[in-house]
Image (spheres, rainbow, N blue to C red):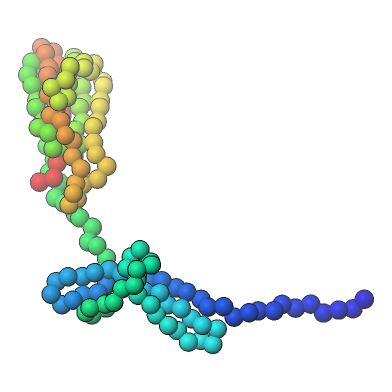
Amino acid sequence: MAGTSGSVSVGTPDAEFNILCDDDGAGVVTPFLRRYTAASDGTVATEDFELDGTTPYTPAGTVTVCAPEAAANPEVGSTAQRQTGAGTVTVPAGARSVTLLVLAGTASVAIGGGAAAVFPAGASATWSVDRGGQAGEQLGDEFVFTGVAGSDFAVLTTREA
């Protein structure tokens, strides 16, 4: 039995979306969603919506491609403090990272006024946040490091300057 095979194509509308910005010229920039629909005959129609994709939106000013948000690039300051023998190093709340390196003897750390934990020689510990920036994260507690006779430790910190 001989035969032929083939396919049938039915033209259907094709929709694409883009987030654009409406600049009213007075400093207010509103992002909105524009839908481009291409009909099977090649004509293209546009519809504008709020970012929810269902509420119609009418631009009030100049429509542009939204500028990418500038990544926050805060200045970060660092400190290194060494304590040899009896003494205390205090790191106020608000640091982005705190690292303890116990070189000899022991050092204890009390966080946020809590009970102290003792770290032996060779121990290290780091407390840090994931990100900084405009609404940057920071450690919310004060750290108090205490050494006794024979102690030797270093405390390294970073914080937004």
Q: Residue furthest front?
A: 55
User: In the image, is residue 133 above or below residue 158?
Assistant: below
User: In the image, is residue 29 above or below residue 80?
Assistant: below
Q: On the rendered image, what quadrant is the N terminus found in?
A: bottom right
Q: Is residue 161 left or right of residue 45?
A: left
* Among the 4 quarters of the image, the one containing residue 159: top left
Q: Residue 152, can we see it? A: no
Label count reads 0
Nearest the eye: 153 or 99: 99
Q: Residue at x 8, y 21 (%)?
A: 88
Q: Residue at x 24, y 69 (%)?
A: 30
Q: Residue at x 18, y 76 (%)?
A: 24
Residue 58 picture location, percent across and down: 29, 77
Residue 112 picture location, percent across and down: 14, 25
Residue 19 picture location, percent across and down: 34, 69
Q: Residue 36, can we see it? A: yes
Residue 27 picture location, percent across and down: 14, 71
